[in-house]
Amino acid sequence: MRITFLGTAGSWPTKERSASAIALDTDRELVLFDCGEGTQRQFFQSSASFMRVRRVFISHFHGDHFLGLPGLIQSMSLNHRTEPLDLYGPPDAKEVFDQVLKLGYFTLRFPVTVHALSPGHSVDLDGYSVRTAEAVHPVPTLAYRLEEGPKRGRFDGEKARSLGIRGPDFARLEAGESVKVGDNLVRPEDVMGPPRAGRAIVYSGDSAPCPAIEKLAYRATVLIHEATVGAELEQEANQWGHSSARQAAEIARAAEVQELFVTHFSSRYKELEPLETEAKARFVDSHVARDLLDHLVRQP
Amino acid sequence: MRITFLGTAGSWPTKERSASAIALDTDRELVLFDCGEGTQRQFFQSSASFMRVRRVFISHFHGDHFLGLPGLIQSMSLNHRTEPLDLYGPPDAKEVFDQVLKLGYFTLRFPVTVHALSPGHSVDLDGYSVRTAEAVHPVPTLAYRLEEGPKRGRFDGEKARSLGIRGPDFARLEAGESVKVGDNLVRPEDVMGPPRAGRAIVYSGDSAPCPAIEKLAYRATVLIHEATVGAELEQEANQWGHSSARQAAEIARAAEVQELFVTHFSSRYKELEPLETEAKARFVDSHVARDLLDHLVRQP
């Protein structure tokens, strides 16, 4: 899996940062979390192609999180896309997506399906599921957890050899077939460890610190949490439905995630090192996201 | 007057070029011609401020010419704008501007007035007028001519001295007052040349070569004309309502403009020098526009 931070600005873009958008390559398909203005152009600066985006999950309908959608969809059409696109958002999503799909003159050349999700809703997709939780923000906002299905356990080559498996049978057994050794049947489960949990990526959208997101993030591989401000502005930010870097890190620690990326920085922060230092002080595996940063998420 | 090319891409942005937008500082106010996706961020890369934009003239409602408007207006609101904003567009403008003003959750904190203009329409503004012409494009599209009011003629200091004007009277006469020299009254018109035409900037929007635009551009100081392609793709481009660099230069020459800037380049052109060469061969004062290029328009 690969995460590409396409835009890490909060509220409005800056010279250095584009509006919110995160591309996630699940290895099977490319999905997008939020799509702020400028996302299609950020794709051209990255190693990913916007034509491959199969699904878009919008956290909420403040402009900096979805105003890149009309341009993205229109450019997909102009570039002769025919593959379907699915759009997901909070309960009020249908009305806004309908507006997005009718803005100005263009011909939609591919099927677009719109999904309004409730908090706690789960959808099963191609090799992964997406579950939602309700964020704390002035408008309906969802956090998302994208999780792969469980993976097969590790193949124990030593044990296979000790059971007499040799040559082509070795590869067949590793691929999941049962094989015979003399009169004995050796089944894959005899030489595989227990199934392993798939990787899970959680994205907070915009939110004040919130138990529902902490719960959603439980033992996630990567938590991407908003950190609009530093701790010095925490109280004001919380009132507006935002978090500080310190609070994001506390959620990461409480949820026992493996890694935290903070994003959605207020334009007042030109340098992000202080926010990273603040987060690391609470949760050591914290990083600040930067526009066009690629992060490979390995199977633990 | 200063022109800032904020975006010079055609159809969709590229790594090098943002979608169509041109800022024009009339010395009294800042106006915008078209506002493609990403315009607000381009402002941060330029020396102009989007908060100063007083009016926006949209040529037509293909996405690459107006999808930056919702974000621009929402960011103006978030930044506590209170000054009015006027939006102008072709006859179908009201419906689209209404959609633009209702996209997602935000509070509009300043008055926005929407104007639908017909071809040939002229509006008188603060020290300048804007006149429209109908472009040749598959959807209703306007070209715009922004022209300053006539300027006073040049003050002839030699002549003033020869009429006996001295000391403070000299400055008063130059400022437009009549002054007495003995029994004679010397009036400003006695020492001023004839009124001079104001500067005129013409923007084609998207169009195939078109007599109405040639007429609109007559003796303009600067013509900004689209040149989506080079001459090698001219016929195909004309069918889609676009021009080549060669055709833009022919219009500039026929209209007797002082300078031509071509813009709105197809993403197939990574290098623009061939388009500039092609235009200069027909009209020597031709230039290719580039993102963030500033051009000072001097009083001739």
Image (cartoon, coloured by chain):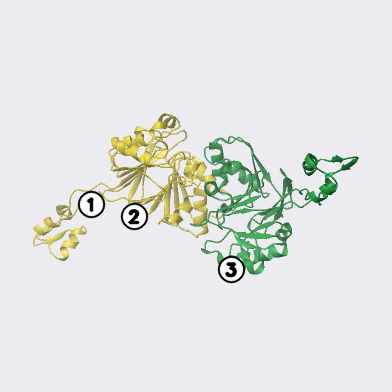
Chain colours: A green, B yellow
Q: Which of B281 and A297 is in front in this view?
A: A297
Left-right relation of A291 to B190: right
Q: Mark 2 lies on which chain?
A: B
Q: Do the residues labelled 3 and 1 touch (CB within 8 Å)?
A: no
Q: Nearer the viewer, residue B58 or A115?
A: A115
The quadrant the C terminus of chain A occupies is bottom right
Left-right relation of B82 to B132: right
Element carrying mark 2: loop
The residue where tag 2 is placed is: B27
| Tags 3 and 1 on a common chain | no
Element carrying mark 1: loop
**Amino acid type indicated by mark 3:** Leu
The residue where tag 1 is placed is: B152
**Amino acid type indicated by mark 1:** Arg
Q: Splitting the image into 4 quarters, where does residue B245 fall?
A: top left
The residue where tag 3 is placed is: A233
| Tags 2 and 3 on a common chain | no
Tell me, yes or no, if residue A13 can be seen here.
Answer: yes
Q: Splitting the image into 4 quarters, where does residue B48 fall?
A: bottom left
Q: Between marks 2 and 3, how big is the CA–CA gap? A: 39 Å
Element carrying mark 3: helix
Tell me, yes or no, if residue A242 can be seen here.
Answer: no
Q: Position of residue A295 (x, y in %)?
A: 62, 54
Q: Where is residue A221 in the image (x, y as percent from the top left)?
A: 70, 56
